[in-house]
Amino acid sequence: MKRVLALIAAFMLLISMAACGGTSGDDAQEQGSQTTEEEVYTITLSHQYATTTAFHDMVVWWEEQLETRSNGRIQVEEFPSSQLMPPDQEFAAMLDGRIQANTCNSALMASFDESFCIFEMPFLFGDSYESLENLAAFCKTPEYDELIAGAVEAKGIISYPAYLDGAREISTIKKPIQTLDDLKGMKIRSTGGRFSEVTADTYGFSAIAISAAELPTALMQGTVDGQLMNPVYVYQVKSPVSYYTIIPFDYTAVDPINVSKSFYDSLPADLQQLMDEVGGELLDHSIEYITPLLDESYEAIAGEMGIEITELSEEEYNKAAEMARTVWDAYEEQIPNGAQLIELANSITDGTYTG
C-alpha cells in the first residue's frame, strides 16, 4: 500500500512540474519579449540651474517627451541647482556611469571638448534676436555634426543642442557701460570659457568665473562689478544689478542636453531612435519657447525691475564688433578646424552659406 501511495505521489509531482515548466518555445520567447519591452531605463540628470530658469524648462520638456513617447520605458530623475554635484564633475560622472545626462553652458562643454569654444566668440552670431536664427542654422549644418557634435561623441558623450536666452550681454551694479572705456578695470563674471580671458583682455576688464548658483551672492557682496548674462536669465532670477548694456560678448547659452554614449548604446534600437528624435526637436522647441521671452525679458528688465538699459552708439558698437576679430584670430590659431568654423559662422550670418 505504501508503494502505491508513493507511485501516486510521484505521478502527481510529474504532472505539477509539467504544468509549471511546460511552456512552449514560442511562449517562452513571447514572455522574454514582454520582459524586455517592459524594462525601464532610468536617466539621472544633473545641472546647475535654478528651477525658475528657461534652462530647467528645457530639461522638463525633454523629460516629458521621453517619458510619454516611450510609454514610461524611459524615466528621467532630474537634479537641478547642483543638488547632486558641482557642474565641473558632471562629465566624469557620465563617463563612469554615476549619472547618465546633464545640461550645461557651452563654456563648460568646451572644458570637455575644445570644439565648443566657437560659442565664446564675441559678436560672431549677432545680437540676441539675430543669434536665435543664426545659431539654429549653425547647429543644423553637417559641419556642426562632424566637427563639434562628432568630436564630443568620440569622447563618449552624445550632445543634443538647444539654444536659449539670447546673447550674453553685460549688466553691472554701480555704473552703466556707455562706452568701451567704461569697462576698463571692472571685475565681470564670465562663464569661464577658454577664451574668456582673451575677450576680457581685448575689452579691458577682468573675467572671473563663478557658477550660476553662486552668482547672485557674488553680485550682492561686490565680489564682482557685473556679469555676462542673457536677458531672460537676468529677468527670471531677478539678478541684483542696476544697469544693462547690449553688447553680445558670447553665445555660451547654447546649452545642449548631453547623454552618456555608453548608456545610449545600452538602449534598445527603438529607444535610441526616440532619443534622437526628441533631441532633434529640442533646438526648434527652444527657439519657439525663447523668442517671445526675449521681448518680455527686455521689457521687464526696464519696467518691472527698474534696470537702465543702454545701447552703445553706432560708432562704439562698430568699434566693439571690430575688436572681436582679435578673439576670433586667437580661436583660429589655437583650435583645430577653427578657421573653418569661423568661416562657417560668418557665411551663415551674412547669408552666403549654401550647405
Image (cartoon, rainbow, N blue to C red):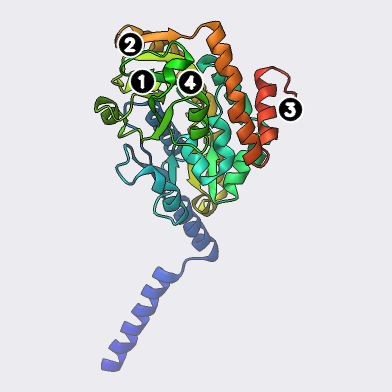
Q: In which image quadrant can residue 243 be found?
A: top left
Q: Nearer the viewer, residue 126 or 182?
A: 182
Separation (CA) of disc 3 from disc 1: 35 Å
The residue labelled by disc 4 is 166
Does 186 sit above or below residue 150? above
Q: Amino acid at mark 1?
A: Val
Disc 1 is placed on an element classified as helix
- What residue is pinned by disc 3? 355
Q: Nearer the viewer, mark 1 or mark 2?
A: 2
Q: Residues within 10 Å of mark 2 (few under 14, many from 20)?
A: many
Q: Could you tell me which secondary element the residue under label 2 belongs to?
A: loop
Of the numbered discs in the image, which one, if any, rests on residue 82? none
Earlier residue among tags 4 and 2: 4
Residue 337 place in picture, x, y as percent:
68, 39
Q: Secondary structure at mark 4?
A: loop
The residue at which mark 2 appears reads as 307
Point out the frontmost of discs 4 and 3.
Answer: 4
Dot 1 corresponds to which residue? 234
Q: How many marks on residues?
A: 4
Task: Give the amino acid at mark 4.
Answer: Gly
Residue at 38% over, 8% down: 299
Q: Earlier in the sequence, mark 3 or mark 1?
A: 1
Point out the image quarter for the C terminus.
top right
Horizontal relation, residue 314 to residue 1: left or right = right
Looking at the rendering, in which quadrant would you find the N terminus?
bottom left
